[in-house]
Image (cartoon, rainbow, N blue to C red):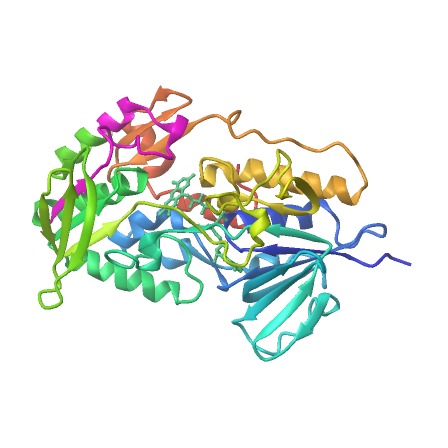
Amino acid sequence: MPSKPISIVVIGGSHAGLGVSHRLLRRISPTSEATPIRLTLINPSNEYYFNIAAPRFLVKPGSLSSNQYLYPIAHSFQGYPDGSFNFVRGLVRRIDKNDKVVQVERLGKKEQKGQGEEDITSVDEETISYSYDYLVIASGSTTPATLGLTGLKIPFKADGLEDTRSGIENASKELAAAKSVVIGGGGPLGVELAGELAEAAGPKKRINLVSRSEALLTSPGMGAMEDVRVGNKAESLLRAKGVEVLKSAMVEKVTQDPETKKWIVELMPTGQRIEADAYVDTTGTIPNNVFIPKSYLNDDGWVNVDAHFRVVDGETSRSDTYAVGDITCHPYRLLSRISGQAEAVVSNIEASIGGQKRLVTYSAEAQRKMLVVPVGQSTGAGHFGGWPLIGCLVWYFKGRDFLAYKALKFLMGEAH
Ligand SMILES: Cc1cc2nc3c(=O)[nH]c(=O)nc-3n(C[C@H](O)[C@H](O)[C@H](O)COP(=O)(O)OP(=O)(O)OC[C@H]3O[C@@H](n4cnc5c(N)ncnc54)[C@H](O)[C@@H]3O)c2cc1C
């Protein structure tokens, strides 16, 4: 007689959650006699959003079609045995760590009882609860612009509560219509967006890029990725495209004139005021953590994990709860870090199910550092393990389509 399936719940259907889910279903046979698994993936949207290419498709909508950056999630799991996978469109509202249950606000079809039924502990019109043996938190992060906190509302990250397609369309139209744009933040996103805007519109559009640090791409959070030479190269490429780069300046206040709809951006320490048709905030990373027990979080709101990605609850590593991707306390919240992290999480869940003590260890510092920042289609700046990249290599690695050619691999948890 086959054993009762082990129930694994994954919260978040983006790069990290999908990477872990597909790897788990491939590695731990859902039909295994000894340890079958049943995986429930919870995400507020039906679609996987390849946000990495956002600077390209927001500014040049014709360059990529929507099916190169939006993919139906459930469809990608069709190849696994019946009953082994269950997709729930919803937003996790609460983790009950003692009873090992997650409570989900239902956003999809209400008659979704059926698949994964065995793990449902309660259901009503608004919510549905799932019990778990193992939980993987992959709820990631959002940005001020995604939430529309300052300046234009732009879906740099998935915002499952709204229609991503219409969000993209609206933001794209506003960026195209603006004759003047101020971009706050001289990190990779600010530089990439400025490069795309300048290339698409030429001298017709006035673009100001405001950078807090003296060199671009060296903002706090870049850590060991930063390299002043790369920042200087990006700056000279942007200036050649007509972008005005304001360095050692901070955006102090942003307001919108209710009549003219112009944005007024005030800078520190100079007191300079710039009026523009659009202000785009590319700064800040905000953890999606409202539903996570406070005892799992560090002072900045990220989930504490040990070197094996087990969630640290107070002082204790939990062997039933893992976190992966942006939501963890690991530095460098980057897509390029996810494959290594997902591999470690999956190996360690597999080891735990099999009763093995030896766990895979992940070190953020050991992974090779690289930075690839296109400035327009055909050139850009970057380094690979400290070796500077020439413009055509930046085109080859990223600039040609902002990695859209790899999106399907990320969706299937096959990218490295
Ligand atoms: C515009 C942009 C460009 C970038 N470009 C690069 C790049 O070129 N290279 C690179 O390495 N990195 C890049 N990054 C960083 C990269 O996007 C992140 O590292 C990556 O998205 C992290 O993936 P994740 O799956 O951990 O989290 P996220 O992508 O943030 O996904 C989290 C998922 O969880 C869901 N979720 C949130 N809360 C809940 C809940 N309560 N219940 C259920 N689901 C929930 C969300 O809707 C989302 O689907 C870029 C970031 C931005 C904003």
Residue 248 occupies which quadrant of the picture?
A: top left
- Residue at 45 percent across and 40 percent down: it is 333
Q: Position of residue 33 (x, y in %)?
A: 85, 52
Which residue reaches farthest top? Answer: 387
Would residue 60 be seen by someone viewing this image from the given angle?
Answer: no
Q: Nearer the viewer, residue 402 or 253?
A: 253
- Residue at 35 percent across and 59 percent down: it is 147
Would residue 32 be seen by someone viewing this image from the given angle?
Answer: yes
Q: Nearer the viewer, residue 380 or 361?
A: 361
- Residue at 65 percent across and 75 percent down: it is 123
Q: Position of residue 390 (x, y in %)?
A: 29, 24
Residue 127 occupies which quadrant of the picture?
A: bottom right
Query: Above or below — where is 160 with respect to 224?
Result: below
The verdict on residue 210 being magenta is: yes
Residue 173 lies left or right of residue 13; in this view the side is left
Q: Magenta part of the protein: which range?
A: 205-233
Q: Position of residue 12 (x, y in %)?
A: 54, 55
